Image (cartoon, rainbow, N blue to C red):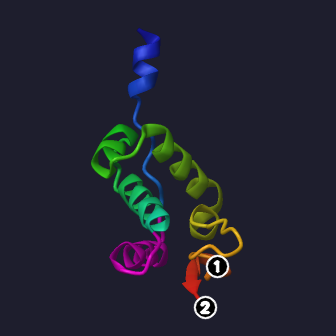
């Protein structure tokens, strides 16, 4: 029974600053945000609202392990660390880069 309890235990909601929330919401709304970034932003926003990993995964069409990964990365390093893209040379997303602080990603 302990295994069952641990598997269904809800993760604590992520804490976001107002600036982080505004940035993530802007990325979700923007039409030029790469899909990977938008998915990560949606995961973090849902986690900050207290949704359990399984529900986030189901609603966003991804896996619980993906939700857990990005929830954990955000908790470790905040917006820039979580939403970094590792673009290959010639990749269409190579223009996305990480700015300092909680400003996040910009095109440039």
Q: Main secondary structure of the magenta part?
A: helix
The quarter of the picture where the C terminus appears is bottom right
Measure the C-alpha gap from mark 2 to mark 1: 8 Å
Q: Is residue 98 above or below residue 38?
A: below
- Quarter assignment of residue 5: top left
Looking at the rendering, which quadrant does residue 93 occupy?
A: bottom right
Residue under the image location 37 percent in, 80 percent down: 30
Q: Is residue 64 magenta?
A: no
Where is residue 56 shown, x and y percent of the image?
34, 47
The residue range painted magenta reads: 16-34
Q: Position of residue 80 (x, y in %)?
A: 62, 70
The residue under the point 43% across, 38% down is: 64
Residue 101, placed above or below residue 108: above
Query: Which dot marks residue 97?
Result: 1
Verify CB contact (< 8 Å) between mark 2 and mark 1: yes
Q: Residues within 10 Å of mark 2 (few under 14, many from 20)?
A: few
- Give the mark, 2 or 1, whose residue is nearer the N terminus: 1
Q: SS of the residue at dot 1?
A: strand
Mark seen at residue 108? 2
Residue 86: x and y in percent read 67, 65
Q: Residue at x 48, y 62 (%)?
A: 36
Q: Residue furthest right?
A: 89
Which residue is found at the position 46% from the left and 14% from the top?
Answer: 3
């Amino acid at each position: 029974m302990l295994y069952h309890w641990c598997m269904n235990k809800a993760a604590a909601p992520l804490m976001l600053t107002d600036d982080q929330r505004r940035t993530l919401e802007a990325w979700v709304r923007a039409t030029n945000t790469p899909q990977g970034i938008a998915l990560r932003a949606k995961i973090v926003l849902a986690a900050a609202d207290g949704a359990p990993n399984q529900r986030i995964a189901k609603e966003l069409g991804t896996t619980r392990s993906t939700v857990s990964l990005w929830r954990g990365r955000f908790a470790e390093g905040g917006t820039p660390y979580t939403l970094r893209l590792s673009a290959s040379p010639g990749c269409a997303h190579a223009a996305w880069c990480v700015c300092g602080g909680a400003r996040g990603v910009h095109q440039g």
